[in-house]
Amino acid sequence: MNESDKKAFFERTLELARKGWGNTHPNPMVGALIVEEGKIVAEGYHFQAGSPHAEVEAFRALGRAPKDGATMFVSLEPCSTTGRTPPCVEGILNAGIKRVYIGAMDPNPAHAGRGIDILRDAGIHVEMADEEFQTQATRLNFIFNHNITTGNPLIALKLAESANGMLAEVKGQPSRVTEDEARAGMMNWRRLFPAICVGSGTVLSDNPTLTARLADETFCPVRLVLDAPLSTLEESVLPRNLYSDEYSYQTKVLTTVLGMKNETAVKKADEWEVSLIEMQHDDHGRIELAELSGVLKQLNLNAVYCEGGASVAQSLLGEDLVDYLFRYQSPKLFSGPAALPGPDLDALTLREPITAKLGEDRLTHGFL
């Protein structure tokens, strides 16, 4: 098999893997295909947690025993342990596949490389993708990789700023910082994450829905609101979209003992069937954001996409709680006296940054 064909087959495994975008948590996105006589004869991908893995789906799609000399390409090292489904290395061995090409190694330090060793010990030729593709295949599952190596949910922060570092043209009022292409990209990232988080100021000023509005669907992640005094549940500002739309069951308000003493707001939360989660507060009465990771674990959420304003962003960054940053930069200038400045993102060092041009805007994202 020549290198050009290998490259094309590997790229197809990533296209397949992305079909599981946002659906596989807490599992990774994986794509697999079977090649016979230089042609793809079956494909599969992991659709959602608990469903068959990509390799099994590819065998099912084939619907028969692979021919002698059949090859499998898979974007991630086949699993070697039994979870909700049997280990994929067993399926490969039982199918009689003799050559397996793997896009990236399992990041779990407990058994990274174990699946490869099992296959090789059984006499199967195993070959890894080149370094460039391994980097791509690994990065696709950055949420899963963080979870499996740290044991913690990934906390991501998204900020959109003007060319002079402003988050809004007028503080307290919604501003269109980026244009259509960048905003469509944001929707795609919302679709990936199982949860989205904002502060009370964003709910009061923007009245957002926090859904991922895509061409073929509208998806609603779990919506978390940071609201220590329960100001977003005051009768004077209701109804907010997050509490009254068709996805209201996806909304949870993180508050404090001080908020729980706001009897009027608590009563409104009960009337609107809004879930309240009590957290500790700091000396200033603000939510203790260091507890956010623990709350995410309690809710079985392996990641959160924070779209809070300047205050939430500054707090998360100040307490070193951000694992991944999405920085959207617009060529616009917000130079009026009422403009809202954002955190100094130039002072941060991103690891493994990726930059994309989105119309006139630019997105840079990477690890902190």
Image: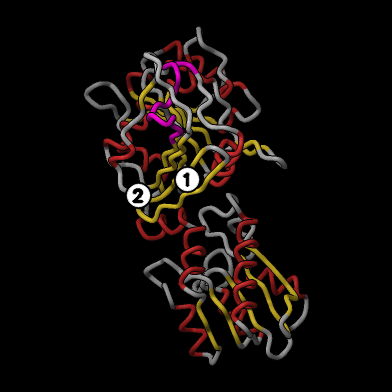
Q: Is residue 171 left or right of residue 54?
A: left
Q: Residue at x 31, y 37 (%)?
A: 317
Q: Residue at x 48, y 68 (%)?
A: 132
Q: How many marks?
A: 2
Horizontal and vertical percent position of residue 337:
37, 14
Check disc 2 and report the residue beneath it.
350
Q: Is residue 223 left or right of residue 229?
A: right
Horizontal and vertical percent position of residue 96:
65, 87
Residue 268 against residue 105 in the figure, above or below? above
Tell me if mark 1 has few (under 14), some (14-19) or many (20+) residues whose alpha carbon lies within 10 angstroms of its own.
Answer: many
Tell me if mark 2 has few (under 14), some (14-19) or many (20+) residues whose alpha carbon lies within 10 angstroms of its own.
Answer: some
**Magenta segment boundaries in residue numbering:** 159-173
Indicate which disc residue 334 carries: none
Residue type at numbered disc 2: Leu
Local SS, label 1: loop
Indicate which disc residue 301 carries: 1
Q: CA distance from mark 1 to mark 2?
A: 24 Å
